[in-house]
Image: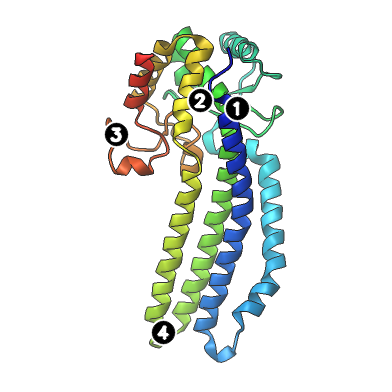
């Protein structure tokens, strides 16, 4: 029996990936235009034409984005491994994990088994990454391997494998790359604006600071928008997919209960990377939904456990 909603989720994730690919350069060009408008306001005496400067800057910005994105696209695995402290797990190191992954890959009809990485941390967490069969990877912490029984660990692996099947991981990788570039660009524009404001000592500084605050607010909003492109519903769907693959929803519920007690991975500092895990290793946990949970990357883990227990 195929996973219910699989094709629908794949279509949605592919569509969102394309939309992000289209939206991102538009956002970058908009930021550059804002920069020249602000810069022109600081240097009115220089008679700078923001539109002409923007048009002259477009090729350089486009080239920079393409180069950065290309490097990130082809080296994303090593970048994420470094950000999470993960490394390849050899078969001889842990045949138990390899057997579980192989069996699930066969059961799910995957053409190629994902690579397996390990994070040397006693906390309990896991994530999937990659953009194609060549780069799909499931990373498990030392703690989650050692502290879960076979059924629980199998359920966690099935959850991550469902993320791969649903193409959640591809959308996540695109988001991580874009958020990283966007954060860098926003910081560069803010520093340039602050530098211009610091050189002026007239009445325009108040307006300048207001523009800086507006630019910072736009940066926060757009970064949040990229995060919301990654629907938290993906975790519910991955939980359901794991329950269907293993036929043991109670095993995943038990695993999530253990994970909730100690999900923090010390090596993970970046928020965009943290959202890839089965439970965000950096967010403060909420037992029930609240206003603040609207901005969380994951739904409350207790809700996920309750749904699994009702299956």
Q: Does residue 118 appear in the picture of this structure? A: no
Q: Is residue 28 visible?
A: yes
Residue 106 has which mark? none
Mark 4 / mark 1, whichever is N-terminal: 1
Question: What's the CA distance linking mark 4 and mark 1?
Answer: 55 Å
Q: Secondary structure at mark 3?
A: loop
* Residue 258: x %, y % from top left: 36, 19
Residue occupied by mark 4: 204
Q: Which residue is mark 1?
A: 7
Residue 234 is situated, as x and y percent measured from the top left of the image, at: 48, 31
Q: Secondary structure at mark 1?
A: helix
Task: Name the residue carrying label 3.
Answer: 286
Q: Earlier in the sequence, mark 4 or mark 3?
A: 4
* Among the two numbered marks 1 and 2 on one chain, the one whose residue lies closer to the N terminus: 1
Q: Which corner quadrant of the image does residue 50 belong to?
A: bottom right
Q: What residue is disc 2 on?
A: 120
């Amino acid at each position: 029996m195929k996973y219910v909603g699989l094709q629908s989720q794949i279509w949605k994730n592919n569509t969102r990936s394309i939309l992000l690919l289209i939206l991102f350069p538009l956002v970058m060009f908009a930021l550059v235009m804002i920069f020249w408008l602000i810069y022109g306001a600081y240097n009115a005496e220089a008679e700078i034409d923001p539109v002409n400067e923007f048009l002259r800057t477009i090729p350089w910005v486009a080239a920079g984005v393409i180069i950065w994105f290309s490097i990130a696209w082809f080296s994303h695995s090593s970048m994420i491994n470094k950000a999470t402290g993960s490394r390849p797990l050899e078969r001889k190191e842990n045949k138990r994990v390899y057997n579980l992954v192989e069996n699930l890959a066969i059961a799910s009809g995957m053409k190629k088994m994902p690579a397996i990485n390990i994070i040397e941390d006693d906390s309990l967490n896991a994530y999937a990454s990659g953009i194609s069969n060549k780069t799909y990877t499931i990373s498990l912490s030392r703690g989650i391997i050692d502290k879960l029984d076979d059924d629980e660990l199998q359920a966690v692996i099935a959850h991550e494998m469902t993320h791969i099947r649903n193409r959640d991981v591809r959308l996540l990788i695109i988001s991580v790359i874009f958020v990283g570039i966007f954060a860098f660009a926003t910081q560069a524009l803010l520093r340039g604006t602050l530098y211009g404001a610091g050189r002026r000592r007239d009445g325009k500084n108040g307006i300048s600071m207001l523009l800086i605050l507006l630019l910072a607010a736009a940066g926060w909003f757009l970064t949040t928008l990229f995060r919301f492109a990654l629907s938290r519903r993906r975790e519910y769907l991955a939980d359901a997919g794991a329950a269907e693959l293993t036929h043991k929803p109670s095993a995943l519920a038990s695993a999530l209960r253990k994970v909730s007690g100690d999900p923090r991975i010390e090596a993970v500092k970046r928020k965009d990377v943290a959202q890839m895990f089965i439970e965000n290793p950096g967010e403060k946990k909420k037992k029930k939904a609240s206003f603040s949970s609207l901005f969380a990357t994951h739904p409350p883990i207790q809700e996920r456990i309750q749904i699994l227990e009702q299956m």
